[in-house]
Image: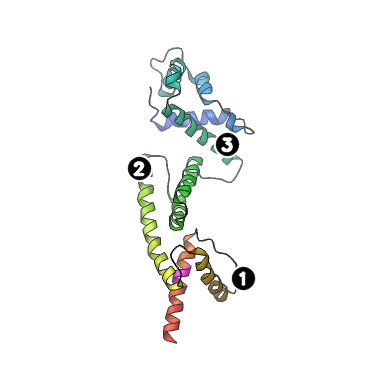
Amino acid sequence: MTTLTDNATRNALINAIKEHINPDKPQSVNIRKYIIKQYKPDDPTGQDNLAKFAWELHHSNRNLRNRDHVLELFQLLTLEATGLEQRKASSIKTSPLKEAAFKVFKLIAGQDILMVVALNEIKEQISLKTIANWESLFELLTKKRTELEAIADTVYELAGVSPGALDDLSAVIVPLYNNLRGKNITTINWEHRSWWEWSHKHLLERVSTQAAA
């Protein structure tokens, strides 16, 4: 089956699907039917990849149409196309494919709060359009997770709580923060690196002050 490798072909598909979408029911798009209707030539000879793909899709048997990689293509394109429609009506700028990928990554991370922090930190730094992007993602994620682990180990130790005990850690940091900043917060979102860095800095300062007293 024709391989849709070039960006122009992919973008043409996405734009076509986007135009076909009913903004009120974006999930109702029948991509296969629409691609065939819009792009199938009578003769695929000399046609571009998109036309050849539509022709083959129309003339192939049911088994070929339902192959996993073809269905996956439809799902990804629907995700991109509906996301474009949603972004047109909102302030969301992130690729819907990236949104979906990071949602899954966070589910996989589970209770590993440092992995969640690393994911949040790199989300705006990374693109997921090419295989190289994915390789960079995992390299950067590993790097950030390692950096955070070094910071978190010190924070847990200086706070006198067990690693992973976020409620106990909050019980130490919340009053410290309120005292230093003149605030009255009651909770901390440990999914953001800034809290770990703030805690690291001020716990070290507290230790230094106590040692000098």
User: Distance from label 2 to label 1 (Cα)?
Assistant: 45 Å
Q: What element carries label 3?
A: helix
Q: Do the residues labelled 1 and 3 touch (CB within 8 Å)?
A: no
Give the class, few, some or many, for how many residues have Cα within 10 Å of label 2's Cα (few <14, many ≥20).
Answer: few
Of pointers 2 and 3, the one earlier in the residue sequence: 3
Q: Residue 147: image x %, image y %?
A: 38, 61
For disc 2, the marked residue is 132
- How packed is label 1: few (under 14 Cα within 10 Å), some, or many (20 or more)? few
What secondary structure is the stretch in magenta mostly built from?
helix
Crowd around label 3: few <14 · some 14–19 · many ≥20 (10 Å): some
Asked if the residue under mark 3 is in contact with the one under mark 2, i.e. CB atoms within 8 Å, the reply is no
Look at mark 1 in the image and give the residue it sits on.
184
Residue type pointed to by label 3: Glu
Q: What stretch is highlighted in magenta?
A: 198-202
Q: Is 166 drawn above or below residue 134 in the view shown?
A: below
Q: Position of residue 180 (x, y in %)?
A: 54, 75
